[in-house]
Image (cartoon, rainbow, N blue to C red):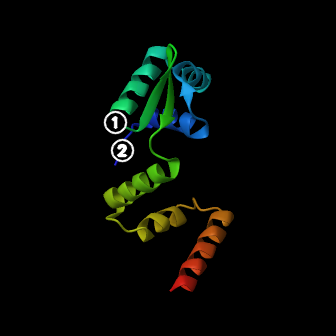
């Protein structure tokens, strides 16, 4: 599993929206949202490359970066890891926690009901 920090995840999100992108394009987008120095962002690009979370190709004097892992694959890995670490691999306590704290909207509840109905139909 590719492990990325919260800051590195912002870089990944930029690349998931559109890729390939140059370092300068990535820097420009992230600096609109965060007060990060260009060198910090380039360090994150290097770390993500070392972790094999992103790849790059050289085009002239610049590098074009692309994600090596899809957003869906990363979300699946990260959510499984999260549930395993905090809830011993069980999803029910996670959903119960959000339900008890009033963090589920009516649309969340409707979507969960629909998902459960689909799962029951498959059995």
| Residue 108, horizontal then vertical, whole percent | 63, 64
Q: Residues within 10 Å of mark 2 (few under 14, many from 20)?
A: few
Residue 89, by quadrant, is bottom left
User: Looking at the image, which is closer to me, 2 or 96?
Assistant: 2
Residue most extreme to the front:
60
Residue at (59% x, 22% y) in the render: 25
User: Looking at the image, which is closer to me, 111 or 48?
Assistant: 48
In the rendered structure, are the residues bearing label 1 and label 2 in contact, judged by CB atoms less than 8 Å apart?
yes
User: Looking at the image, which is closer to me, 105 or 50?
Assistant: 50
Residue at (36% x, 55% y) in the render: 81
The Cα atoms of the two marked residues, 1 and 2, are separated by 7 Å
| Residue 97, horizontal then vertical, whole percent | 47, 64
- Between disc 1 and disc 2, whose residue precedes? 2
| Residue 4, horizontal then vertical, whole percent | 39, 39
Residue 56, by quadrant, is top left
| Residue 99, horizontal then vertical, whole percent | 54, 66
Residue 30, by quadrant, is top right
Q: Secondary structure at mark 1?
A: loop
Looking at the image, residue 33 sits to the left or right of residue 66; the answer is right
**Circle 2 residue:** 2
**Circle 1 residue:** 51
Q: Residues within 10 Å of mark 1 (few under 14, many from 20)?
A: some
Q: Secondary structure at mark 2?
A: loop
Residue at (38% x, 25% y) in the render: 46
From this view, report whether residue 47 is shown above or below residue 80: above
Q: How many marks?
A: 2
Q: Which mark is residue 37?
A: none
Can residue 57 be seen here?
A: yes
Residue at (44% x, 41% y) in the render: 68
From this view, report whether residue 73 is shown above or below residue 118: above
Can residue 37 be seen here?
A: no
């Amino acid at each position: 599993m590719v492990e990325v920090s919260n800051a590195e995840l912002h870089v990944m999100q930029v690349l998931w929206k559109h890729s390939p992108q140059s370092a300068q394009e990535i820097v420009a987008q992230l600096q609109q949202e965060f007060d990060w120095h260009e060198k910090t962002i380039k360090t994150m690009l290097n770390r993500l490359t070392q972790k094999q979370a992103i790849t790059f190709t050289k085009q002239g004097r610049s590098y074009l970066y692309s994600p090596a892992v899809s957003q869906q694959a990363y979300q699946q890995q990260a959510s499984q890891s999260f549930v395993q670490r905090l809830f011993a691999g069980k999803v029910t306590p996670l959903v119960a926690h959000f339900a008890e704290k009033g963090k589920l909207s009516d649309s969340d509840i409707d979507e969960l009901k629909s998902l459960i109905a689909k799962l029951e139909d498959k059995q």
